[in-house]
Amino acid sequence: MDIREKIFEVCGTNDLLALVLAGGDVRRFHQEGGHAYMQPVSEHTFRALLILLHFWPNASRELIVALLYHDVIERVTGDPPATVKAVFSRVRAVYDDIESEVAQALGLPSEHDLVGTLDYIRLKVVDYLEPCITCKFQLERRPQQIYKRGIKFVWKYLAQLPEAEVEPIRKFLWKLEDGTWES
């Protein structure tokens, strides 16, 4: 069975527009399990794009497009838990391979196309920062765990960017942490 047949088997269609739009309907894994809010990928992506353009108003087209499509493939793969991918490198490698294979078969851009560039680091900062903002003010235990873990990833990726890019985000993170962000 080739990759397009596999995609059809999982999704019931090979129509690119239908797949891309349905990708926005995937519910993010970290919001499942009876928590107050199940965030769709489309909302995460929209918010991530706004965050990206807030901190990098001159972001490259390649970065914007990669971020726009970065979770669409989850229509095929599902949204694997970030913690599992972080702890089990084999799981991450398998998902990365599948995501790249599906993106290539569909002719979609992939965040993996940016690996080794500053744009990849920027994408990862925004991809982790958005759920941190989403989870920060939810009182349930799991969103608070996601916030704490996500902030660690944000700082990890920020350490790989030029200081001039880090400073505005650092100031934002301090306000987010101490609860003064929106005041």
Image (tube, rainbow, N blue to C red):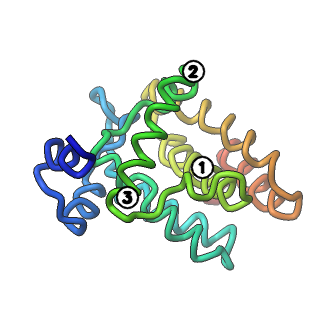
What residue is shown with label 3? 43
Q: Nearer the viewer, residue 121 or 153?
A: 121
Residue 103 appears at what percent x and percent y? 39, 55
Q: Are marks 3 and 2 in contact (CB under 8 Å)?
A: no
- Is the residue 137 above or below the residue 32 in the image? below
Q: Residues within 10 Å of mark 2 (few under 14, many from 20)?
A: few
Q: Crowding near pointer 3: few (<14 within 10 Å), some, many (20+)?
A: some
Against 17, residue 147 (above or below) is above
Disc number placed over residue 87 in the picture, else none: 2
- Along the horizontal axis of the image, is 47 left or right of 181? left
Residue 132 on image: x %, y %: 56, 44
Q: Secondary structure at mark 1?
A: helix
Q: Position of residue 33 (x, y in %)?
A: 29, 26
Instruction: Name which of mark 2 and mark 1 comes first in the sequence.
Output: 2
Residue at position x 51%, y 63% in the image: 66
**Label 3 element class:** helix
Please give the count of numbered marks on the rendered protein.
3
**What is the three-letter code of the residue carrying label 3?**
Glu
- Identify the mark nearer the N-term, 1 or 3: 3
Disc 1 target residue: 129
Q: Position of residue 178 (x, y in %)?
A: 70, 43
Give the mark nearer the N terminus: 3 vs 2: 3
In this rendering, position of residue 151 left or right of residue 161 = left
Q: CA distance from mark 2 to mark 1?
A: 19 Å
Q: Residue at x 54, y 20 (%)?
A: 88
The residue under the point 52% across, 23% down is 90
In the image shown, does 107 or 114 lie closer to the viewer? Answer: 107
Q: Which mark is residue 70?
A: none
70 shown above or below 92: below
Structural distance between the alpha carbons of marks 3 and 2: 26 Å
Looking at the figure, which quarter contains the N terminus? top left
